[in-house]
Image (cartoon, grey):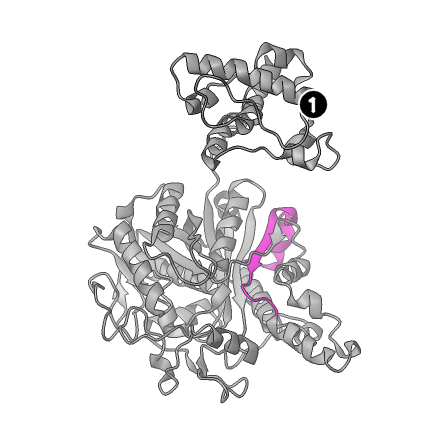
Amino acid sequence: MAATSVASPLCTWLVAACMSVTCDGEPSRAKLRGGGGGRRRRLAKCSSRRCLSSSSRGGSSIQGLMSFEPCDEYYSSQGLSSLGSNVLFGSKTGSMNRSRRRFSARSGETMAVAVQPTEELTKQMKPVTKQRRVVVTGMSVVTPLGHDADVFYNNLLEGVSGISEIEAFDCSPFPTKIGGEIKSFSTDGWVAPKFSRRMDKFMLYLLTAGKKALVDGGFTEEVMEKIDKTKCGVLIGSAMGGMKIFNDAIEALRVSYKKMNPFCVPFATTNMGSAMLAMDLGWMGPNYSISTACATSNFCILNSANHIIRGEADIMLCGGSDSVMIPIGLGGFVACRALSQRNSDPTKASRPWDTNRDGFVMGEGAGVLVLEELEHAKKRGATIYAEFLGGSFTCDAYHMTEPRPDGAGVIQCIEKALVQSGVSKEDVNYINAHATSTPAGDLKEYNALIHCFGQNPELRINSTKSMIGHLLGAAGAVEAVAAVQAIRTGWVHPNVNLEDPDKGVDMKVLVGPKKERLDIKVALSNSFGFGGHNSSVLFAPYK
């Protein structure tokens, strides 16, 4: 019986993948590229009998696939052992060559339907367990408005802009000369001097913010000694990585490879920030980075929460970090025609949903959150800032840089996030939007938000980027910190520079030029990235 329960869906998948969609009258034999051995004949014969039996009952070919069962002859043969796991996973050691492993199904629909029995079997085998809850117990930022979460949010509430003329290099050759540049930053006490001199800024921001988040979360030396370091992980991503390190290496190579920084390769990769932080802390749990352009941070946050929910970790440091305030970084985005050129008035340049917006303002920085399993946090007496409810990802599958005109990818992402989190649309009354101040992107997201939440009279929407610019891969984490701070304080920050709202934008749902009181039920934070990456995460007050 045990063998039967496994073989049925597996055989169904194999045979259904080989069969054509239609099955009227004479059955279609499995079509495999390459020669047909004994196994092929057994599968084809098995297919014929079952396909005929399903058709004779009046069912469609799809229904036949769904009700397909392997015949007795298949069980009398070598069955699963004759196929072997190598065939399924495409191992080079399998007895079937590459061409014979390619199933020539006529449509993706057939394949999608055929795999369902296997998915159902997997679900049946999962043990029933109570889902672990995830809470936020610490956070930190490095931004143009401050390197402390409270200082940062207080500046947002007051409508202070962190956008100014770029001072790190000569911008005279470029049409854009402004950015959300960090003017002063120190790693003293957080990063060893030998690394401070060699690391890219994105990594220095990451290490500093990560360690400050732990301090904010009450991780004293005593606590650090007691926690199980094999259940502690780091997942902090970057969209651009060590671009300056790589650029400097190219310049050195023009002279000689001997002039190159021996750390140029590891310090340029996006994963090394998480790795170096884990080395400093001795944390041996999940450790990697994700790079999905400007959606990077949200991807890292949601995946970190999933590691905790699955029991693979109790604590995760997560977020994002980026710094491309260098000529090649500025020049690259200028070439994309993505940046604002409002150089004469930098603080007015980032203006989401305003008619006079002309592109986003590039920023730099990092944001890191401490996600922790609820019972673990309570046991150590941690202060709980908010609860992480869940989130979702989708892909527009439309264009490298432009959003889908119909907003379908964003809508699907939001709706999936609500379902995954068990939250109703009516409960979401605060949204920290992606809104970058681009002509196309702002309206597409706004329309998607109204489509999903427009019936909620309490809904308030704002954009943190109006004051700090677009921090690329760090944006989602910094904005998640802003969302959590809104939950903690009961205040949502203003939308600055929204002087002439775009046609079709209802100011009743957008926060005005001053901070507003709001009793937040559920906060949603969106992040979207080049490549059509959509992400939504949800936070709520801990109860």
Secondary element under disc 1, as helix, strand or loop, is loop
> Can residue 516 be seen from the camera position used here?
yes
Q: On the image, which quarter does residue 464 sit in?
A: bottom left
Q: Farthest residue toward the right? A: 258
Q: Which residue is mark 1?
A: 37
- Camera-nearest residue between 100 and 270: 100
What's the residue at 67%, 25% (across, down)? Answer: 36
The image position of residue 17, as x and y in percent, is: 54, 29
Q: Is residue 6 above or below residue 435?
A: above
In the rendered view, would you say 9 is above or below 524?
above
Outermost residue on the front side: it is 26
| Residue at image point 45% right, 34% down | 109
340 vs 308: above or below: below
Q: Considering depth in this image, is 215 or 364 the residue closer to the camera?
A: 364
In-image side of 448 versus 4 (left or right): left
The answer to whether residue 543 shows anywhere in this view is: no
Q: Is residue 237 magenta?
A: yes
Q: Estimate the x, y position of residue 368 in percent, counting from the top left.
A: 51, 61
Q: Position of residue 360 (x, y in %)?
A: 40, 72
Residue at 68%, 28% (x, y): give it.
35
Q: Split into 4 quadrants, where in the image is the N terminus?
A: top right
Q: Say which quarter of the image contains residue 527.
A: bottom left
Q: Is residue 25 left or right of residue 8?
A: left
Identify which amino acid the numbered label 1 is placed on: Gly
Q: Which residues are magenta?
A: 218-242
Locate residue 263, reporting x and y percent.
72, 70
How many numbered marks have been drawn onto this rendered protein structure?
1
Q: Is 239 contained in the magenta span?
A: yes
Instruction: Please rate how many residues cluster around mark 1, counting C-alpha atoms within 10 Å: few if below 14, some from 14 to 19, many from 20.
Output: few
Horizontal side, residue 505 vs residue 259: left or right: left
